[in-house]
Image (spheres, grey):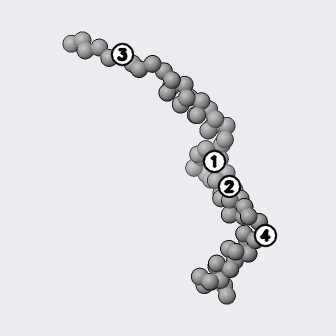
């Protein structure tokens, strides 16, 4: 029966029986189609940002001098 908790569980089971990655595919589509940006929508941007973070984390610590 549509619109009930049991009906929803049956529909979810049927979707997963047809395709084990049904909900993962829906989520991936939503992430790519988002208008707010983010890494899911632009994997190349994620790669660039990760490379920058990797370079920064390998830098030497800044030397702080207490000159007044």
**How far across and how far down the image is residue 30, in percent?**
65, 57
Q: Which mark is residue 64?
A: none
User: Vertically, is 8 above or below 56?
Assistant: below
- Estimate the spatial distance between the alpha carbons at disc 3 and disc 4, rounded to whole Å: 60 Å
- Estimate the spatial distance between the alpha carbons at disc 3 and disc 1, rounded to whole Å: 37 Å
For marks 3 and 2 on the same chain, the one whose residue lies earlier in the sequence: 2
**How far across and how far down the image is residue 64, in percent?**
32, 17
For marks 3 and 4 on the same chain, the one whose residue lies earlier in the sequence: 4
Q: Residue at x 70, y 74 (%)?
A: 13
Mark 4, residue position? 18
In this orientation, does residue 51 appear? Answer: yes
For marks 4 and 1 on the same chain, the one whose residue lies earlier in the sequence: 4
Q: Quadrant of residue 16?
A: bottom right
For marks 3 and 1 on the same chain, the one whose residue lies earlier in the sequence: 1
SS at badge 1: loop
Q: Which marked residue is nearer to the observer: mark 2 or mark 4?
A: 4
**How far across and how far down the image is residue 4, in percent?**
60, 84
Q: Residues within 10 Å of mark 4 (few under 14, many from 20)?
A: few
Residue furthest to the top in view is 67
Q: Residues within 10 Å of mark 3 (few under 14, many from 20)?
A: few
Mark 1, residue position? 40
Mark 2, residue position? 28
Mark 3, residue position? 63
For marks 2 and 4 on the same chain, the one whose residue lies earlier in the sequence: 4
Say whether marks 3 and 2 touch (CB < 8 Å).
no
Say whether marks 2 and 1 touch (CB < 8 Å).
yes
Question: Which quadrant is home to the N terminus?
Answer: bottom right
SS at badge 2: helix
Relative to 13, is 55 on the left or the right? left
């Amino acid at each position: 029966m549509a619109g009930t908790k049991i009906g929803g569980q049956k529909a979810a089971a049927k979707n997963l029986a047809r395709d084990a990655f049904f909900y993962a595919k829906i989520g991936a589509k939503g992430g790519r189609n988002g208008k707010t940006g983010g890494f899911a929508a632009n994997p190349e941007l994620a790669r660039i940002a990760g490379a920058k973070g990797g370079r920064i984390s390998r830098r030497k610590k800044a030397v702080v001098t207490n000159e007044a």
